[in-house]
């Protein structure tokens, strides 16, 4: 084919009609996928705070069991950047839809197998080893999930409503968290402690298999996003997306990662560390504290659409700056509110932290995809999101456990404030992306 013929063929491809996804289908597919993925992730977080230590590390002391459980919790965060590189490569090369299906399958399979894994008493040292392998698989799957869901939403959105569309995958964590903690709360209220530790904790992991079937059905009905379909028609794809991302867009990866730190610190300190601390040190029963978390996460869910609307009206940076400043201040409330042991004070603290999580998390659905061009958008958005997880969440419960032992809850609150300050600095150095043309 000569040059003129090839050019004409490319122009004809570029003008070919692209199949559009309905708004309702995009909203449901991006929301349900992240809800399922985060449900899987949160049931492990809850189990790590309540039962993973005694089941898989019974040969150690109570404190060592908690620390070991939180280390296995952190393994998935180390796997997430690898998942973002793996799934990001295929998402930028072959498409968003098929990559999202693969990430959901990996996450769901790993979660279900954790529910079937025998404990230390049955298979000895193989139990914690296999647990770490499956936890790594969870991390790989989630590493590819969020970026694809965010792109599914934003690449189907009108330019001035991208934050609103990007809000749908950001609502997934609230729904997944509520479902996970609600199920654990139901089990805590209906089973004895012995029944829960023997087999009850496995039910949420096994239930994941049914949720994955629903998620796959919804996602297989989708068309490719119009933005990526156009890139395919024009043969505009990176040969090696991760190399292009780091060579040309490394600054945005760094700033995006640091901007995410506040979200992770707020959530995992309040939802994982506080649960463990409340049950072990404040005298709350498991079901009481889970009930408080289920109440508090409603504030996170309410803050998410409000923050998204504000982002479309005022921009991403102003909303994040306000949210980060409030999060810095919130760290100083941890000592007086959480240490009191009062149900009202603890509920206020948890609601405040999760509300601010919703405020700072909602803009990320649009902001991170907007930082990168189509050629590396899946890889770049996923990398920023998951590298932020290493900094803000992977060791957060472990570090908090060490800090509270060394200096009390005030030190843990200081950790939250420092994390928020780091994100604030990144946002101040970042450009506004609201007018970016995807």
Image (cartoon, rainbow, N blue to C red):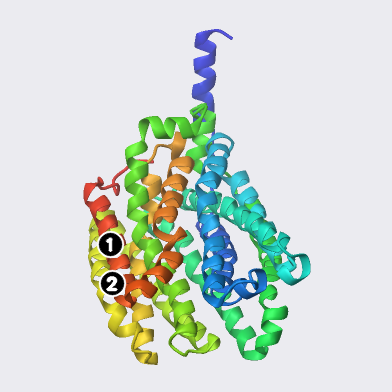
The quadrant the C terminus occupies is top left
Q: Position of residue 321 (x, y in %)?
A: 23, 59
Between the C-alphas of marks 1 and 2, the distance is 9 Å
Residue drawn 57% across the image and 77% down it: 50
**Element marked by disc 1:** helix
Q: Of 349 and 156, which appears nearest the observer?
A: 349
Would residue 392 be seen by someone viewing this image from the given angle?
Answer: yes
Horizontal side of residue 319 vs 80, given as left or right: left
The quadrant the N terminus occupies is top right
Judge whether 140 appears above or below 285 on screen: above
What residue sits right under mark 1 in the picture? Answer: 418
Horizontal side of residue 299 vs 139, given as left or right: left
Residue drawn 50% across the image and 55% down it: 77
Q: Position of residue 168 (x, y in %)?
A: 46, 61
Q: Earlier in the sequence, mark 1 or mark 2?
A: 2
Q: Position of residue 218 (x, y in %)?
A: 63, 58
Which numbered marker is on residue 331? 2
Farthest residue in the top direction?
2
Which numbered marker is on residue 365? none
Horizontal side of residue 311 vs 115, given as left or right: left
Residue drawn 41% across the image and 69% down it: 402
Farthest residue in the right direction?
122
Horizontal side of residue 405 vs 103, given as left or right: left
Residue drawn 56% across the image and 80% down it: 182
Q: Position of residue 136 (x, y in %)?
A: 60, 53
Q: Quadrant of residue 247?
A: top left
Circle 2 Cα neighbour tier, 10 Å, few/some/many (<14 / 14–19 / ≥20): many
For the residues bearing labels 1 and 2, Cβ distance under 8 angstroms: yes
Would residue 161 be seen by someone viewing this image from the given angle?
Answer: no
């Amino acid at each position: 084919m000569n040059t003129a013929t090839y050019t004409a063929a490319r122009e004809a491809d570029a003008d070919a009609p692209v199949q559009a996804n309905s708004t309702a289908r995009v909203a449901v597919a991006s929301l349900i996928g992240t809800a399922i993925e985060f449900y899987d992730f949160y049931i492990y977080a809850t189990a790590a705070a309540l039962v993973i230590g005694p089941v898989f590390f019974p040969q150690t002391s109570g404190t060592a069991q908690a620390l070991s459980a939180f280390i296995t919790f952190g393994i998935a965060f180390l796997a997430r950047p690898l998942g973002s590189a793996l799934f990001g490569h295929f998402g930028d090369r072959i498409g968003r839809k098929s990559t999202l299906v693969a990430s959901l399958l990996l996450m769901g399979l790993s979660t279900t197998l954790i529910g079937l894994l025998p404990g230390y008493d049955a298979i000895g040292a193989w139990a914690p080893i296999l647990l770490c392998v499956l936890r790594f698989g969870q991390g790989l799957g989630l590493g590819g999930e969020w970026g694809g869901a965010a792109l599914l939403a934003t690449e189907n959105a009108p330019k001035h409503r991208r934050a609103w569309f990007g809000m749908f995958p950001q609502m997934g964590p609230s729904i997944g968290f509520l479902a996970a903690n609600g199920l654990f709360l139901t089990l805590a209220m209906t089973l004895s402690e012995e029944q829960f530790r023997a087999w009850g904790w496995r039910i949420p992991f096994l239930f994941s298999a049914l949720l994955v079937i629903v998620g796959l059905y919804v996602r297989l009905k989708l068309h490719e996003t119009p933005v990526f379909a156009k890139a395919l028609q024009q043969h505009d794809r990176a040969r090696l997306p991760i190399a292009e991302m780091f060579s040309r867009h490394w600054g945005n990866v760094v700033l995006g990662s640091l901007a995410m730190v506040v979200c992770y610190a707020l959530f995992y300190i309040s939802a994982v560390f506080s649960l463990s601390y409340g049950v072990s040190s404040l005298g709350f029963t498991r079901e009481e504290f889970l009930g408080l978390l289920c109440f508090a996460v409603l504030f996170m869910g309410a803050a998410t659409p409000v923050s998204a609307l504000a982002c479309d009206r005022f921009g991403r940076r102003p909303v994040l700056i306000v949210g980060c400043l409030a999060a810095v201040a919130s760290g100083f409330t941890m000592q007086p509110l959480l240490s009191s042991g009062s149900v009202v004070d603890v509920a206020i603290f948890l609601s405040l932290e999760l509300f601010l999580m919703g405020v700072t998390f909602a803009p990320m659905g649009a902001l991170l995809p907007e930082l990168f061009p189509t050629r590396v958008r899946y890889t770049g958005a996923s990398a920023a999101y998951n590298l932020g997880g290493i900094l803000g969440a992977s060791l957060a419960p472990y570090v908090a456990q060490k800090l509270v032992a060394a200096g009390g809850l005030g030190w843990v609150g200081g950790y939250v404030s420092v994390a928020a300050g780091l994100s604030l600095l990144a946002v101040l150095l970042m450009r506004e992306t609201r007018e970016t043309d995807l």
